Image (tube, rainbow, N blue to C red):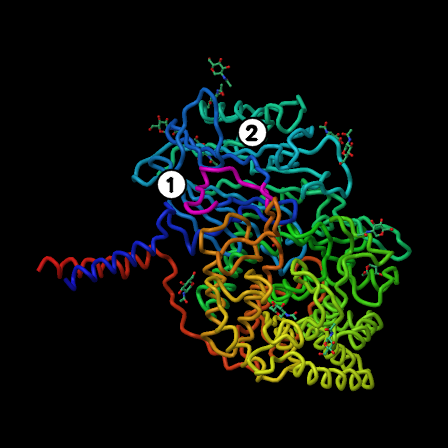
Amino acid sequence: MFGLFSFLVILLVCVGYTHGSIAWKATPFNPPSVPLAVRSPYSSAWLSQGAGSGSALSAAWPQFWNGDTLGWAGFVNVDGVSYNFLGAPAVANTTFKRATQASLSWTSTQSVFVMTAGPVQLTVTFLSPVEPSSLVNQSMPFSYMAVNAAPTDGKSHSVQVYSDISAEWVSGTDSQKVNWTTTTGDVIIHQAQLQNQTLFADSGDRIQYGAAYYSSLSSSNTTWQTGQDIVLRAQFIKNGTLLNTQDTNFRAINNNWPCFAFAHDLGNISGQSDAVVFAVGHARDPAINYVTSGGTMQSRSSLYLSQFSSINDAITAFVKDYSNALSRADALDAEVNKDTSAISSNYSDIVALSIRQTFGAIEFTYTPGNTSDVMAFVKAMSSSESISTTDVIYPAWPLVLYTNAAIGKALLLPLLEYQATGQYPNKWACHDLGPAYPSAPGYPKGNDTQMPIEESGNMLIMTLSYTQKTGDKSLITTYYNLLDQWAQYLVSNTLEPASQLSSDAFAGSLVNQTDLALKGIIGIKAMAEIASLVGDSSANSNYNSIASSYVQKWQQMATTSDGMHLTLQYGNSSSWGIAYNLYADQLLGTNIVPSSVYDMQTQWYTSVENTYGVPLDTRNTYTLSNWEIWAAAIMTTTSARNQLINYVHKYLASSLNSLPASDWYDTATGKAQCSTGNSCQPFRARPVVGGHLALLVASASNSSTTGASITLGATSTVTSPTTATASSTSTTTHSSAMSIRDPRTILSTICMPALVMVLLHLSL
Ligand SMILES: *[C@@H]1O[C@H](CO)[C@@H](O)[C@H](O)[C@H]1NC(C)=O
Ligand SMILES: *[C@@H]1O[C@H](CO)[C@@H](O)[C@H](O)[C@H]1NC(C)=O
Ligand SMILES: *[C@@H]1O[C@H](CO)[C@@H](O)[C@H](O)[C@H]1NC(C)=O
Ligand SMILES: *[C@@H]1O[C@H](CO)[C@@H](O)[C@H](O)[C@H]1NC(C)=O
Ligand SMILES: *[C@@H]1O[C@H](CO)[C@@H](O)[C@H](O)[C@H]1NC(C)=O
Ligand SMILES: *[C@@H]1O[C@H](CO)[C@@H](O)[C@H](O)[C@H]1NC(C)=O
Ligand SMILES: *[C@@H]1O[C@H](CO)[C@@H](O)[C@H](O)[C@H]1NC(C)=O
Ligand SMILES: *[C@@H]1O[C@H](CO)[C@@H](O)[C@H](O)[C@H]1NC(C)=O
Ligand SMILES: *[C@@H]1O[C@H](CO)[C@@H](O)[C@H](O)[C@H]1NC(C)=O
Ligand SMILES: *[C@@H]1O[C@H](CO)[C@@H](O)[C@H](O)[C@H]1NC(C)=O
Ligand SMILES: *[C@@H]1O[C@H](CO)[C@@H](O)[C@H](O)[C@H]1NC(C)=O
Ligand SMILES: *[C@@H]1O[C@H](CO)[C@@H](O)[C@H](O)[C@H]1NC(C)=O
């Protein structure tokens, strides 16, 4: 009896661990959507996993981050038998099989699929470089797909590899007309663009100018062709080569679907082949339109164009650099994994899914003729069309600090410089630089979305944080008066905030918001530090004393009458919320909030958890994953910290969702949240997931002062901040994380022996 019972228990546990319906080995887990080629707001391809059983690489088309279909097909011929390994093409009058997916694994920079095509195994590596130590390299909006083939039966096989993209990479409106050219050389470059180009116009998340590019190294065994999808694919399926011809009948995207293809003949292979490398992306020049003093609009180019005479030259260098880029990516992955593993293996997984997504929303630019004039702009992606939204940069700030604080300078400069010109009429910091990415005209009428305390606090906190991290005082000296103006606004407004929006705008305005007031107070304290750093001792002591007196009053107004937790709103003891701005106090090392508050909140969060985490506040069951992780970073016990991390992990690994990670989700159901109404449009692909790196960023007291400044090419190396999360207020220690990450490993190392033992026991 006992034997049978334990057999059943172990069987149940072990079957549960295999994630039931997903047919391939997923390491570390099957994410909601797999990043394939994610480099910029307009170079962004994903493989949606849908709910439940997921999608193999050969079972569905890749999608743009907003869900638009992206034609991206791949075939491999093995001894004359054709297998589709990428995309879901139908090709009339041909026969081919679908390669089956054996595994998917992913890191911070790569998504790797192993596909079985008869006696040959393909390893398809989607590498989206993350290059924080070279902003020039980071600014290249291109990704790699590399295909290696290897026989699995020890025999020699004749192998040809094919891939194409469609003009869906140019626009989401398939009736738009496109034209194209192919440039041959040691790298072959297909280029396709809208015939009707509209500078700086974004329509339905797709940019209306520039071009999509598909490129590959040329060898004697490479052929190429442009033309109708089924014509190109049938040509390859039947013969294994293409015809090196251009279709010049320019037409609409969906008019006999023009495609842009390559084929590589690997010959007879008996071992692992060399990688066949493709590069894909969308590029444009100029990239950004930015307002300068007097309202003059300035055209800014992508930073990499400072190093290359044309986009084609850049692509040629990019394609040839694949093996070095792979080494750099492996090194970055290893470093990130080392730092995150010191927290927990679940934390490693969350961070690995977040880094490409954040960088995929940021574009680095310069003004032609002045390579010192480097600015970065960010697209909020799914939550708004705005450019350089201050409270989108703020949640992502931990990623900036961890990877290279010079990125922070590049992100803050457009906001600081614009507001210093005096063209923004309000006394507080602006919400963003314009309603329509990639144009940044500012708001001369001051009629942007108003989040006065939120954005003023954010700017002061981030500017000080950058200065602390780098020792570079250029921002605080150049923009001192502006920073002081925002601090004064906070002095007058933050202690008892009027009804304002916080960053969590979907929750609406509220008067006397506890966490918003705290942000403002930390902002005032940050100004005290800024004043001290520039030697303004009277401002330093003035702001210091205001911050101290405010924080005492705040603590009284913000704590419930029974002293159990902070409220969401002063005076309402039945309200509470995630007080994520406490993290800023720790990050800056300002420590104005007493440690008893951290202890109190630690206790409280562990008492109000739902299935997938702590709700954002008492108004709803939804939360934001980045604030969940910010909260984890300030927990005073390891178990409370790990519990919050595990909730976000559980949500991301749940197989309930299908979008590029949505930060906004329901803690009860684990599903991505969307505003109520007929069309459910959840957040997706937002850069705010950079906030998931919060536990990697040491508090100010531990940070190095490396003096990062923005220069071209290699700037500072990737910083490797200490992984400590403990601050003076925290007693967090690192637990020894479980190192078995792969469910199959668990199955084979624990479950199988256990089952065998129980079966043996039963048979005795
Ligand atoms: C497929 O073959 C049929 C019969 O030969 C022919 O009528 C049709 O045009 C072919 N279709 C394509 C797309 O080649
Ligand atoms: C394609 O269209 C663009 C924009 O109208 C135009 O500048 C370009 O010359 C065209 N290229 C070809 C090959 O027709
Ligand atoms: C070109 O596109 C713009 C919007 O991007 C549109 O307003 C205009 O009508 C289009 N022109 C033509 C000729 O299609
Ligand atoms: C078929 O492929 C061979 C090489 O394998 C090539 O010589 C020939 O030109 C191709 N024929 C067609 C019709 O594509
Ligand atoms: C080109 O193909 C031939 C035979 O098809 C093969 O022997 C050779 O290794 C291939 N070269 C490259 C660079 O793939
Ligand atoms: C590849 O192997 C096949 C079968 O063994 C043979 O017929 C063919 O000539 C070989 N091709 C090359 C390029 O070596
Ligand atoms: C180049 O840009 C830097 C940084 O914005 C600026 O300080 C400098 O004055 C500019 N130089 C020229 C020649 O415009
Ligand atoms: C802000 O004011 C400008 C100029 O009056 C107007 O064009 C724009 O539509 C306004 N924007 C918003 C968001 O109200
Ligand atoms: C905001 O809080 C303060 C301090 O508790 C209180 O005096 C004031 O009435 C509150 N404002 C509103 C509108 O509730
Ligand atoms: C206090 O907060 C609770 C929870 O958010 C809310 O239901 C209630 O309406 C609030 N009370 C007042 C007076 O605003
Ligand atoms: C990791 O997160 C999962 C939820 O996805 C949870 O079941 C598991 O216990 C966590 N692992 C550790 C070691 O905490
Ligand atoms: C940047 O990319 C180029 C190739 O375009 C490569 O040669 C160089 O090593 C990279 N620089 C850094 C710092 O990674």
Direction from residue 71 to residue 152 in the image, left or right: left
Which residue occupies the foreground of this view, 329 or 196?
196
Residue type, mark 2 in image? Trp
Residue at the far left: name it.
764
Q: Say which mark, if any, is on residue 678.
A: none
- Residue 591 falls left or right of residue 459: left
- Residue density around tag 1, few if under 14, some if 14–19, many if 20 or more, within 10 Å: many
Q: Which residue is mark 1?
A: 121
Residue 438 vs residue 594, the one in the foreground: 594
Residue tagged by mark 2? 224
Query: Which residues are drawn in magenta?
Result: 50-67
As helix, strand or loop, the secondary structure at mark 2 comes to strand
Residue type at numbered disc 1:
Gln
Viewport quadrant of the C terminus: bottom left
Pinpoint residue 229: horizontal percent, then vertical percent: 55, 26
The spot of residue 361 in percent (x, y) is 65, 53
The image position of residue 757, as x and y in percent, is: 17, 61
Query: Is the distance from the Cβ of mark 1 to the nearest ligand 5 atom less than 8 Å?
Result: no
Q: Considering only vertical position in the picture, is 573 above or below 260?
A: below
Q: Is residue 62 magenta?
A: yes
Q: Is 566 placed above or below 140 here?
A: below
